[in-house]
Amino acid sequence: MSEIKSLGVSPEVHRYLVEHGTPPDSVQRELIEETQKLGGVSIMQVAPEQGAFLTLFTRVLGARKAIEVGTFTGYSSLCIARGLAPGGKLITCDTSEEWTAVARRYWEKGGVADKVDLRIGPGADTLRALPADPSFDLGFIDADKGGYPVYYEEILKRLRPNGVILVDNVLWTGRVVDASAQDDMTKAIRAFNDKVAADPRVECVMVPISDGLTLLRKK
């Protein structure tokens, strides 16, 4: 699962880089194993090295208030919640009761259940229902690709200056540069990447972590 998502990295190199970062602990390894049993959809889980990055980045940012669109089985939310400053809170949005039931169990096991506020329903509706004041420190978008522009706009207006949005799957297994790839999701990712690269409200960098991660700082 994680080897497939790590572009241009062999299984051996991937194993090495995971082992030489902060590796998944027993709770995270158990969650990875349980998610893999779901079959092909397990590809939606963030890779171990991306999870370690989320925790470290959240901690370095000093984030107290974070929001995520796309919970799945809870690996990324577990990682973000662990990096929050004392008293911090993560709102995470998803439409699946089934997958997030797994997430709830692992938030409990991981000791972060009190830091995570799960909202079930369409992500756009959940975001629009939030207060409009710019109070979030961190956003993470990892959901349906066609919805990325809406999630981005709704989070950006609620993000404090110097706050950061992280966006997953921006390299889309390399299909973004494959001219023959003309499916709807690939075209949606390309359009989103073009949008944020030209957005004067932010500065951004795209890094080849796992399936590609864009970091956007609100000016």
Image (spheres, rainbow, N blue to C red):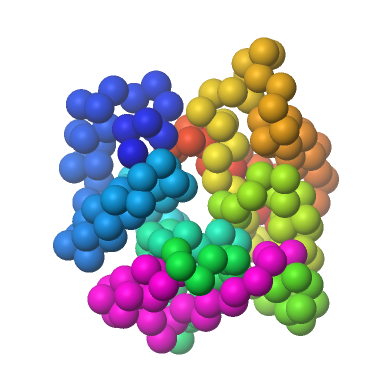
Region in magenta: 100-124
Q: Residue at x 37, y 31 (%)?
A: 4
Q: Quadrant of the N terminus?
A: top left
Q: Main secondary structure of the magenta part?
A: helix
Query: Along the line of sight, which residue is nearer the eye, 83 or 43?
Result: 43
Is 122 magenta? The answer is yes
Nearest to the observer: residue 79 or residue 34: 34
Question: Quadrant of the rendered structure where residue 82 is?
Answer: bottom left
Give the mark count.
Answer: 0
**In the rendered image, the vertical position of residue 189 relative to residue 34, given as above or below:** above
Q: Position of residue 213 (x, y in %)?
A: 53, 42
Classify 123 as above or below 215.
below
Q: Measured along the vertical axis of the image, is residue 71 above or below residue 101? A: above
Closest to the observer, 3 or 18: 3
- The image position of residue 125, as x and y in percent, is 75, 70
Residue 177 is at least partly visible in this image:
yes
The x and y percentages for residue 90 are 52, 75
Residue at (29, 51) in percent of width and height: 37
As displayed, is residue 56 above or below residue 206?
below
Left or right side of 165 for 107: left
Residue 127, horizontal then vertical, whole percent? 72, 70
Instruction: Please indicate whether residue 121 sits to the left or right of residue 31 in the image.
Output: right
Q: Quadrant of residue 174?
A: top right
Residue under the image location 38 percent in, 81 percent down: 113
